Each structure stands twice: as C-alpha cells, then as structure tokens.
Amino acid sequence: MHPGDPSTHDLDVGYDALKTILETIPVGILLGDTRGRTLYVNRKFVDLFGYTIEDIPDQEAWWPAAYPDAGLRVDARRQWAAAAAEAQRNRSETPPMIFPVRCKDGGMREIEFRMAATDTLHVVVFTDIGERLVAARERRTNEQRTAGLLALSQMTDQPENVITDFALEQAVALTNSRIGYLAFVNEDETVMTMYSWSREAMQTCNALDKKVHYKVAETGLWGEAIRQRKPVITNDYAAPNAFKKGYPEGHLPISRHMNLPVLEEGRIVLVAGVGNKPAPYDESDVQQLTLLMDGLWKIIRTKRVEQALRESQARFAKAFLSSPAPLVISEIDSGRFIDVNDCWVRMLGHSREELLGHTSKEVGIWADPADRDRMVALLRQKGAIKEAPVQFVSKSGERIHALWSTETITLDGRPVMLSLIYDETERKRAETEKERLQAQLLQVQKLESVGRLAGGVAHDFNNMLGVILGHAELAMSRTAPGEPIHEDLTEIHAAAGRSAELTRQLLTFARKQTVRPRVLDLNAVVEAALKMLRRLIGEAIALEWHPAGGLWPVKVDPTQIDQVLANLCVNARDAIDGLGTITITTENVTLDGEPSADPEVPLFGDFVRLSVRDDGCGMDRATIDNLFDPFFTTKPVGLGTGLGLATVYGVVKQNSGFIQVHSAPGQGATLAIHLPRCTTPDRPAAAVQPKADPGDGRETILLVEDEPSVLRMTTLMLQRLGYTVLPAGTPGAAIEQARAHAGRIDLLMTDVVMPEMNGRDLAEHLLSLYPEMRRLFMSGYTADVIAHQGVLEAGVSFIQKPFSLQKLAHWVRRALEGEVRS
C-alpha cells in the first residue's frame, strides 16, 4: 500500500491524523523495533532531550548518551529490558519508572518512563516530571523543616548543645548535605566560636587542629558569610577562589559548601554551614536553611533569656536571704510579710513562720504602730524612702533603733515594698570600734614617729657622740687621774657614754637596731643588762637575779634579749603598786613528750628558760588570752602602746621559742621565755668586750670618713693605738692615696654611707690593688639603712658608731687577724 493510492485513502487519513497527534502530544514518544532500532521520535522528544533520530539511531547510541554514568546505565538498561519483556508478554503498559536522563546539552532531567509493546514494535512514553518532583521535594522539605522546628520548640528543657546538635542534623538533612556546622559570633563580629559539628563531620574529620575559636579576619570561606553579611554558595570547591584558605591536614574533603549568617537587630549572632551536597546548592537550600536557623536562634535566645532570668532570680534570692542587712518584702497596704531574710529574723527574734503571712502590726514589731502608717504615706508621696529613723521591738521586748529604707518593686505583677533595715545599735557600736581603732592608729603613728626620729638623728648624733667620746678619752690619757681636769673629762666621757646608750635603747625600742643572732651565754647577757633594767623599774622595786649554773648556750641577737627583758620588766613594774620585787631566773628545761594545755608548747626538746616574776596585781584568764595580741593593753591611753608584749612574742617566735604565762588575780605573774638550746660547737660570745692593749698597733690603715671631725678624731685614736694612718675624706681621695702609697696597706676602715660610692663598693675597688687588705666597716646609720649597703652579711667586720678607744682597738685587731663579727 502506498500513500495516495485510492484504495488506501482511508489509511492515509488515519496516518496523518496519528502523526499529527504524535507531533503535538505533550509527552515524548519513541518507537522502536524488537531489534533495538529507533524508528521514530516525536517533536516533544527532541524538545525534551535535544536528541534527533540521527543522534540515537538505535539503543547502542541511546544508552551511553542518556546515561554517561556506567553504573546508572547498567541499572536503567536492566530495568528497561525487564519492562519491555513484560510489556511484550502481557501486551500491556508497564508501570512507570523514573530515571534521570542526560540531555544533549549536558543538562539532566527527571523522566518518567512508560512502555507498551507488540510483536514487532515498542512504544516508549517519556514524561518530564522535574517540576513535579521539585514541588514534591519542596513540599516534603517544608514539612520536614516544620516538623524540625516543632521538635525544637519542644526541646526548651534540653541543654543548648543538644538543641543545636539536633538543629544541625535537621539542616544537613533538609539540604541533602553530608556535613554541617554551627558557630556563634561575638558581639563585635570578630570571632566565631564553633559550637556544633554534624555527626558525619565528627566521625570522618581527623584534622590536627580542631580549634574552637576562629578570628573572622583569618578565616576563609567559613567567615565569608560574616564579611559579606549574606549567604555564600560555593558549588565547585575545587575551582580557584580568592576566599579559600585551604583546610588543615586530615580535614574531610569538601566538594560544595554553603553558609549563611543569622542576624538579630542588625548584628550577626550565628553562622550555619553545610557541605558536600551531591547536587549544586541553590536558593531553595538557602531559604530552607535560613528559615530553620532563624527558628533555632529564636529558641536559643528565648532559652538564654529565660536562663538569665532564672539566674537573676536565683542571685536575687541568694543575695536576699544571705544579705548581712535585714531585708523584708511586704504588702504596701496591709504590711503583710511576703518574705524575710535570716538577718531580719535574727534581729527581731521571731521565726520565719511567725512572720510570713502576718502583718507587721499583728506581730507587734513597731514600737509605735503609727510609724508604719507615716512611712507608707511617705512612700506613696516620694516613691522611695531612704534611712528614715524608726524603732522596732524584738520578740524579747528589746527596743531596736534602726534606719529604714524602702522602695516599690513588682512581684508577680503587683507592687510590693522591698525594705532594708540598718540596725543603729550596730552602727553606734561600729563607730565606737572605729574610734578605738583610730586611737590604736595614733599609737602606731607615735611609735613610727619615734622610730623615724631615732633613725633620722642616729647618724649625725652618733658621729657627734663619737667625736666627744674619742677626744675625751684621748685627753684623759694625757692627764693624771688626780687632776681636776681629769675628773671633768671623766664626767664628759660618762655623759657621752650614757647618751650613746640612750640612743641604742631608743633604736632598740624602734626596732631599727642591728639584729644578728649569735651563740651566747644568756646569763652573761642578763648580767650585762641589770644596770639598765634597774634604771627602768626605779628604786621602789627590788630586782633579784638568780642565774642557773651550767646554762646551755642559745643563739639569739643579744639586743633582742635586751628588748625582751626591758619589755617584761616594764610590764612587771606597771603591775606593782608601790613597793615590790621583780625576780629574773634562768634554768635548763627538757621537754620529754608530756602534752601541754598550750598548743604552742612542743612535746620534745631542750630549752633555756628565762623567767621574769613579779608580785603585782596579777591577771585574769581573759587578759592572759589576749596578752600578746597587738594593741592589747590594760593601761590608760598614753601610758602604753600595746606593742611591748607583742614585740616580745615576735622575738621569741622568730628565734623558734615559746612563752608560758602563769598568773591569777592578786597573785602576781610569771612570764617564762623558752629559747631552744644551741647545739653548735661555737663558743658562746662574751657579754663584755675584751680589753685591748693600746699602742701595740704596727700596721698601716687606710681610713675613709666623709665627716671631717670624725675623720680627725678616729685618726688620732688609731695613731694613739700605734697604727700608721692614711686618712681620706672621700672615696676618690682614698683611691688616690692607695695608688700613691708605696708600702703595704693592711686594713681599710671605711664609713658605709658616703658620697661618690658606698663603703662596700670602695672596698671591692681597692681589693684589686691590695688583695690581702682586710676590711672594717663603720656607720652611725640604723640597721635598715646599713642592710641596703650589703655590710651586715656573714663574714663582714662592722663597728657601730660611736665607739670607745677600747672598742676601736678590739675591732681593728679582730679585723686584722681575720676574725669577723658573727
């Protein structure tokens, strides 16, 4: 049959009609035979895929063109063959199959396939369902996001990290991604803090530096959403990109990336990111992630606000209940107690149960109930009351004078009164205590003034006394003892000596005297101090001294023993009214493990006990308990600093000892000082200076002193002792003399504090010229000044101004013979 043949006219009409239908139908049609050849494709097929019948003359051309992915091609071909066989066997249409198809232009389309077959012909219908799938996918995504937000809204009782982890997994699923992260941003948008990673990211990322905080300026794509303040999509991560800065070793590979900022009132608060979606990210992903993250932030913000409110309420409750000042919350009109703190309960003596739910007038706390009415009227008038004087009555009936401050606050939506009460009794007590402390401060300032005065005048005063003592001694050596002038010189010398002793005692009192412990015989030290002690206690009180034989040596600064004895004897003197006796004793004591009621007394050890006993008024237990506290005194103001016995306690503790006190009212008192036995083989130092033979000096001494009168006097004294003296008024002159001197210089005797350089530096300089030269330092300055010059160290000879001819002879000889002051 041929078209146009009259016998086939009806068939021609039917053919044209069928062709018209096939060319205009809105689905793609492909006709093929059973051998896989393509017989026909309609216009819609070409529109859908771009392939003409010439492009795909058979299935062998169709499959690699439509399915370049080999795996997908095998799967599609297998399903297509099975469907064709079923269609041919059943002479029916197959169920729909859905596959992505690669078009001629490289694009992909989601296609629904249907097939029908005859013995010789296959008919395949292609329907583009891309838009339908997109709509369905968007619908499912919206439903998934809505379900996620609903679940989030029900997680407000969960920790914040649980909420963010859940939201992040939802974000990864919504965008069909493989990984994701959430980061909070600080207020100035300079630092992002990584808070959550998706599960797959945590499992597969082995980066060596998984930091938590990142400076935005140093980040790559992660921070670009902050810098641009908008969503940023990177669908080809491998392509060159100026924003990328790479990622650390071990980081999981990234193929695609998208992140976006979450803003609140113009400030970026959160950054959410996802990555490695199989298909490119698009605006739909941006929209879904934005909506989800906005919802997440609202939940987090609400949770944080609620948490801050709870914490604030907890802090208020804690501060309210534990406040050291009485606090009350009550109804304005009725005065009914809503809450009270512990301090209010303690002040009034009523329990919380007796107060809460009752009015202040019912409980009866007002000395004058009209006071409350006046306070409420004043509160309504001014809005707040500050320190209004009122009077309360405690449960025991005690009247309490107080200052009442109150203001209106809102509690559970209604106005109430928050009141603070200040106990005036406590304030007055505090003022009294303040006055007492000010009096103590004045005592301390007096003591400090004495110390400053003593330290300030000691140097010049000692220099002047040294000149007087030295010249008096030299003049006495040139006159006969029976001559009137000798007696006058003797009195001058004695007066200067007493002045020097007073200066030493003043410095000891001010604790500015040199403190250097040494091994000594305590009996000898006490013996030497008896004269001074008798002057302190006066003639009306007898001083008895009972030393123990074979007393063990102790290691302590003798000046500290003088200080201890002076304080104990003065304290004993003040406890005696009129005539009385003070007894000083020493003895050896061994503690053998018997426990004492005093926790400061050790269980074991050998000690030397120095006891001072008086027959005065005695002390009660309370006085004994506070006896050694700083500023504690039983004497009237002006008659005691309260530091004497505290100083004794400090000296004893400094020397690893302890004190015991035995006393009772009307029975006198005994204060026993215990110092540890010194077991070193050192011989105890003698209490008195050995006499030197004047005139036996043969050595050459370089004498350096910046005070001319002291220089002249010391030169004469040294010459009187037989030494050759090279006097120098400055360190520079001393260096010149040393360089110019042709002979040996055996001893450098130098002042410590001088212009140009101090004595220690001068000695170090001269040792390079005379390595064998010995050194003897002298000074009239106090110990705290000398210590800064480095001459109070062990192994350094030092003589304190003023000094006598005998003392000078002794220390010069010790320095020359290599002995040092220990």
Image (tube, rainbow, N blue to C red):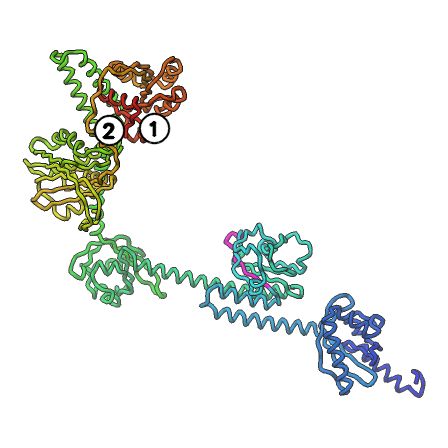
**Residue holding disc 1:** 789
> Which amino acid is tagged 2?
Ala
Q: Position of residue 446 (x, y in %)?
A: 22, 34
Q: Which quarter of the picture shows residue 48?
A: bottom right
| Spatial separation of the CA atoms under disc 1 and disc 2 | 19 Å
Q: Which quarter of the picture shows residue 65?
A: bottom right
Left or right: where does residue 287 sit relative to residue 306?
right
Residue 581 visible in rendering: yes
Q: Please check the rendered image and state whether residue 746 is part of the magenta-colored stretch, yes or no.
A: no
Q: Position of residue 146 (x, y in %)?
A: 55, 71
**Residue holding disc 2:** 454
Q: Which quarter of the picture shows residue 42?
A: bottom right
Q: Please check the rendered image and state whether residue 182 is part of the magenta-colored stretch, yes or no.
A: yes
Left or right: where does residue 785 sit relative to residue 96?
left
Q: Quadrant of the N terminus?
A: bottom right
Residue at image coords 29%, 31%: 784
Mark nearest the camera among 1 and 2 is 1
Farthest residue, direction left: 579
Residue at image coords 14%, 13%: 486
Number of other residues with Cα within 10 Å of mark 1, as a class: few under 14, some 14 to 19, many 20 or more: some
Instruction: State which region is magenta.
Output: 179-189
Q: Position of residue 304 (x, y in %)?
A: 45, 61
Q: Quadrant of the C terminus?
A: top left
Secondary structure beneath dot 2 equals helix
Q: Earlier in the sequence, mark 1 or mark 2?
A: 2
The circle drawn on residue 486 is none
Left or right: where does residue 136 sit relative to residue 64?
left
Classify 709 as above or below 100: above
Number of other residues with Cα within 10 Å of mark 2, as a class: few under 14, some 14 to 19, many 20 or more: many
